Image: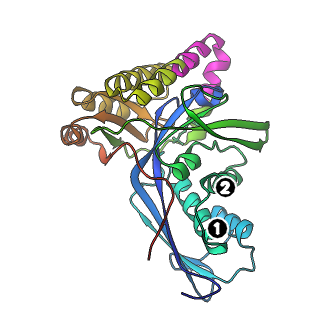
Amino acid sequence: MGATAPSVVVSAPGKCILFGEHAVVYGQPAVAVALEQRLEVSMRPAGSWSIDGSALTAERHPHITMLRDTVLGAEAPPMALHVRGDIPSGSGLGSSAALSVAAAAGFLQTASSGPLDTAAIAHLAHLAEAGAQAGRASPMDTSTSAEGGVVVLSDQVEDDAKWLYTRTLPTPEGDRSWEIHALRPPEQAVHLVLGNTGIHAATSAQVAMVAKTLAAHPERMRDIEAIGAVARRGLRALMRGDYEAVGHAMTENHVLLRHLGVSSPELEALVRAAAPSSLGVKMTGAGGGGCMVALTLDPVATSQAIELAGGRVLVSSLLNAGVHIHDE
Ligand code: PMV
């Protein structure tokens, strides 16, 4: 190991949303879980800055260069970064946030080795994501990837979860704050099976569509509040380890999202296929494509059903580690 720029290998998980997508934009709580699928970044001293063999530039890698410049300074001894992992990109599973979290942790570790400060990592990664998305990123993906386990995000402190920290971000519409919490559900042999439609729908377009619906039909805000109520019920069921009730709440959340108009025929086909072998099933993330998630005791049967209906499958356990430094 060189004295000035040690090598470091860091990994961070992807995420999926169990409850509350879209409603979280209007202040309701959302519950996200870290996935088994992870992204790993290795950093080694080199002659020039690179990522996977090509030059690291602000135009092509705004998140990584922002994190490097903030943590190490642009004049830091150069390193070669390599990225690998099994989180599909562009599917709403948080691959971009996992990269920002792993890079933030790697740069912090390079600057001074010691125990990881997950709150600081989540903060830096959120700023990097927001910087690359015109200041509008929610901290859900970055906090879930940094903390691991089950994370609850809300506009208010939620009684049923352990409060971790407040994240505030200046946005083009003014300052926005989120309360970030952790949930520690009892461990059980349940699995998540994710079905990917392979269709990419932009989160911003889906969020804009909901905003348009609510502007035209203000009474539909009741649907948003109903999603919030289901999310709170789901998080209390998670805390008790009552996975039957968690599943019911997921299915109810899906019906409300479908009614809001953010599902798609392809998502519906995968949700229908997975339902008979699952405790609960719903679309996850912004919708219009992307992924659905099933909570199941029989991941083999649920995976086969989703594959038969044309989905690409990922299986994950429920309680996974957040950002982690690997021994070399
Ligand atoms: O598809 P994803 O994982 O990017 O989730 C978007 C979640 C929304 O609630 C639709 C938007 C948001 O910013 O919270």
Q: Amino acid at mark 1?
A: Leu
**31 or 87, which lies in front?**
31
Quadrant housing the C terminus: bottom left
Residue 211 on the magenta segment: yes
Tags 2 and 1 touching, CB below 8 Å: yes
The magenta region covers 209-228
Residue 81 on the magenta segment: no
Q: Whereabouts is ligand 1, in terms of quadrant? A: top right
Colouring rule applied to residues:
rainbow
Name above or below for residue 218 compared with residue 228: above
Residue lying at 72% horizontally and 36% vertically, measured from the top left: 177
- Which numbered dot is residue 198? none
**305 or 74, which lies in front?**
74
What is the C-alpha distance between the residues marked 2 and 1? 9 Å
Residue under pointer 1: 108
Q: Residue furthest top?
A: 219
Please name the predominant secondary structure of the magenta segment in the image. Answer: helix
Q: Where residue 134 sits in the image (x, y, percent)?
A: 72, 48
- Establish whether ligand 1 lies closer than 8 Å to the Cβ of label 2: no
Left of 135 or right of it: where is 103? left
Circle 2 crowding by C-alpha within 10 Å: few under 14, some 14–19, many from 20? some
Residue lying at 58% horizontally and 86% vertically, measured from the top left: 46
**314 or 105, which lies in front?**
105
Mark 2: secondary structure: helix
Q: Where residue 52 sits in the image (x, y, percent)?
A: 50, 75
**98 or 63, which lies in front?**
98
Residue under pointer 2: 120
Residue lying at 52% horizontally and 56% vertically, measured from the top left: 98
